[in-house]
Amino acid sequence: MKIARIVLALPGLAALAYGIVLFLDYATSAWPDSFTTVLWIGGGPIVNDAVFAPVAGVVGLLVARVLPKPWRGPVQVGAVLTAVLGFVAFPLLWRTYGAAPQPGLHDGNTWLGLMVTLAVVWSAVLVAAIVRIVRVRHRASQKIRPRAHS
């Protein structure tokens, strides 16, 4: 088991080392700009721990306490996906519209893409919750209905 863990950890450590080499190469060639990059890289975990994690915890607790049981799982998954999608889209939503275009990103409407994706996620949450409710009611009706004797 130890050998398997080591073998599985080696590619991850190699990728981490390569990422550090790439970042150092970037940071040494563009020092003033690299300082803002360091702030962005360091600020992400801080904002996550100070804002997103507590909000997600409170929302999860409220969902577990308030919603009926068939709705809990789908709504929790939808809330997590909404938070992750918002976190990933944040840099593109935050940028100013006069900023230089980013290759592959300048031609997309980030707000529209995020809203369509969230509509799909919450539609799936609704469908999953309805399926769960139908299953619960079907099981309940099977228990109540007397069996026909042959």
Image (tube, helix red, strand yellow):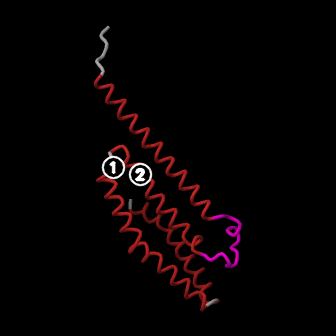
Query: Magenta segment range?
Result: 95-109
Residue 100: x %, y % from top left: 70, 78
Q: Which residue is mark 2?
A: 75
Residue 117: x %, y % from top left: 57, 55
- Would you say residue 72 sits in the magenta stretch? no
In the image, residue 109 sits, relative to residue 36, either above or below, namely above
Foreground mark, 2 or 1, reads 1
Res 137 → quadrant? top left
Which circle's residue, 2 or 1, is located before the other in the chain? 1
Q: Which residue is mark 1?
A: 67
For the residue pair 140 and 23, the one nearer the viewer reads as 140
For the residue pair 40 and 115, the one nearer the viewer reads as 115
Q: Are marks 2 and 1 in contact (CB under 8 Å)?
A: yes
- Would you say residue 96 sits in the magenta stretch? yes
Q: Which residue is located at x 46 percent, y 45 percent?
A: 126
Residue 14: x %, y % from top left: 53, 72
Q: Main secondary structure of the magenta part?
A: loop
Q: Which residue is located at x 60 percent, y 80 percent?
A: 22
